[in-house]
Image (cartoon, rainbow, N blue to C red):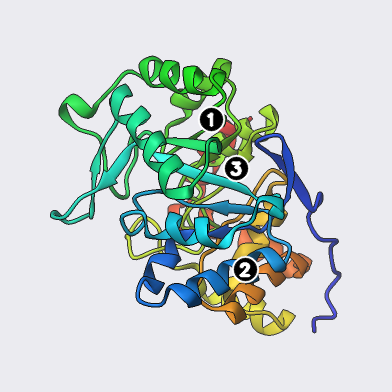
Amino acid sequence: MSETTRREPAAPTTFALAGREVGRVGYGAMSLEHLAGDPAAAVRLVRDVVDSGVRHIDTADFYGDSTANTFLREALRPDDDVVVATKIGAVRATSGPVPLRAAQRPAELRAAVEDNLRSLGRDRLDLVYLRRLDLRPGLVAEGDQIVPLEDQLAELVALRDAGVVGAIGLSAVSDDVLRAALPAGIAAVQNGYNVLARESEPMLDLARREGIAWVPFFPLGSGFADLPKVVDQPEVIAAATRLGATPAQIGLAWLLHHAPNTLLIPGTTSSAHLAENLAAADVVLDDLALGELDALYAARFGDAAWSRARREQS
């Protein structure tokens, strides 16, 4: 372990989501579709998630064409006290470069809520993200799928008022969309974000000021060029070696340290990997690691880009 001065872990250890306090490391259920051929293993994994103390699970009916939701329905019990967040705005597709198609119109949003209720076996959804499809990478709304935000929010607010939806979130949105949606009451935001891809920094700061949970997807990067893999970064590897952690834990620990409203939803099909992800909350980054990791964005995009992001944040 390093002799460098250590900092305390990011506080708090929990954050409010859909009206309940949850631990800051949750579970992303998209990985469950990889266990479609072994339902018993999928159910065991979900039980391991809950038994490990996780109280925040992120899913969607379009994950494996209801596969993930079906496993959650079979595994979760009424007394588990888990916030299950789901997403609408797209549906499963059988062709195309991405196995999804946009479903942004209000009637399609309502139908997607009903699909999630049915596949999860519930009469109320704790948290529903409107996946707006404003931003790449991934699917982007085009043509008649470009729908006014106010029409979409009106549908979701009506569902919330009816008690079908507990809380409303936003996913893949711009700063302007989040600002425009604030009067509707937004509980959480999901955007692509990690230590190497911090273009959403001003939005993260806005969410923090408003008490909104920030739930980054691709927290460790992806195959997309705009979201490179964090675990391949030399500074991340060096910090992991020095601090006795894995590169993935370093990337997740930086996110937790960086903003107290951050909630993580890493996915896995392995109980051992689940334990490793949860242990990221206990990783303490030293001053050397924080300095090197904080500087990575400027190193990738140049000091001018980093300065501009900081000005927008202030």
Q: Circles 2 and 1: CB distance less than 8 Å?
A: no
The local secondary structure at tag 1 comes to strand
Residue that label 1 marks: 165
Question: Residue 253: which quarter of the image?
Answer: bottom right
Q: Position of residue 15 (x, y in %)?
A: 74, 44
Amino acid type, mark 3? Trp
Discs 3/2, front? 2
Q: Amino acid at mark 2?
A: Arg
Q: Which residue is mark 2?
A: 47
- Please state which amino acid type lies under the numbered disc 1: Val
Residue with the mark numbered 3: 214
Packing grade of label 1 (10 A; few <14, some 14-19, many >=20) is many
Say which residue appears at 59% left-offset and 33% top-offset.
313
Nearest the eye: 88 or 150: 88
Q: Residue at x 65, y 48 (%)?
A: 262
Q: Which mark is residue 256?
A: none
Q: CA distance from mark 3 to mark 2?
A: 25 Å
Mark 1 or 3, nearer chain start:
1
x 32%, y 45%: residue: 136
Q: Is residue 94 left or right of residue 6?
A: left
Residue at image location 48% in from the left, 29% down from the top:
175
For the question of whether residue 301 can be seen, the reply is: yes
- Give the vertical position of 290 relative to 199 (above or below): below
Q: Is residue 146 left or right of residue 47?
A: left
Locate residue 51, reporting x and y percent. 71, 68
Res 304 seen here: no
User: Between residues 108 and 102, which one lies in front from this camera angle?
Assistant: 108
Disc 2, SS:
helix
The quadrant of the picture occupied by the C terminus is top right
Query: Foreground: 245 or 265?
Result: 265
